[in-house]
Structures are given as structure tokens and as C-alpha cells.
Amino acid sequence: MAEPVKGPASYFPSIEKKYGRPIAEWKDLIRSSPLARHMELVAWLKTEHGLGHGHANALVAHTLAERA
């Protein structure tokens, strides 16, 4: 039996369903943004792309963690 998805990735299915874009596309947008700080990126996703705070936060956290 598969382990349930935890953390930011647990939001991914609902993000794809609600906003109609695959997660890879959102991550590409975040990576290509001139912004670098977590909350700047969250605010940008909320204002420019209409994401809710939780969804934006999950995408940014997951994407930035890949850089580490």
C-alpha cells in the first residue's frame, strides 16, 4: 500500500484541478520568476495568477526545497 502524500505535494491534485495547469508548469513559472524570496513568490502567485494562499505557499515551498 502506498504511503499517503504529505507536506506541500498533498495540495498538488487540488491545485491542478482548480487552476487547470499541471504542477510542472507552475514550478516552471516560479523558477523563471525574477523573485527569489518565499513570501514574494507566494504574493506574486496570488496577485498575478489568482492562487489561494495555501496553494501558492505549497507550490513555492516544494519548488524552493528542490534547490537546496
Image (tube, rainbow, N blue to C red):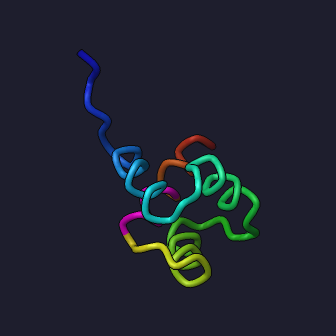
Tell me the residue at 36%/66% (across/down).
54
Which segment is the magenta one? 54-59
The location of residue 67, given as percent across then percent down, is 63, 43
Q: Is residue 28 left or right of residue 48?
A: right
**Front position in the image: 64 or 7:** 7
Could you tell whether 60 is left or right of 28 in the image? left
Q: Residue at x 39, y 73 (%)?
A: 53
What is the x, y in percent for residue 31?
70, 56
Q: Where in the figure is residue 47, as x and y percent of width and height?
A: 55, 84
Tell me which residue sits at (51%, 71%) in the image: 42
Residue projecting furthest to the bottom = 47
Q: At 52% across and 58% down in the image, what residue appears?
A: 60
Relative to 40, is 4 on the left or the right? left
Q: Quadrant of residue 57?
A: bottom left
Asked whether residue 57 is drawn in magenta, I would say yes
Q: Residue furthest top?
A: 1
Q: Assign the N terminus to one quadrant of the image.
A: top left
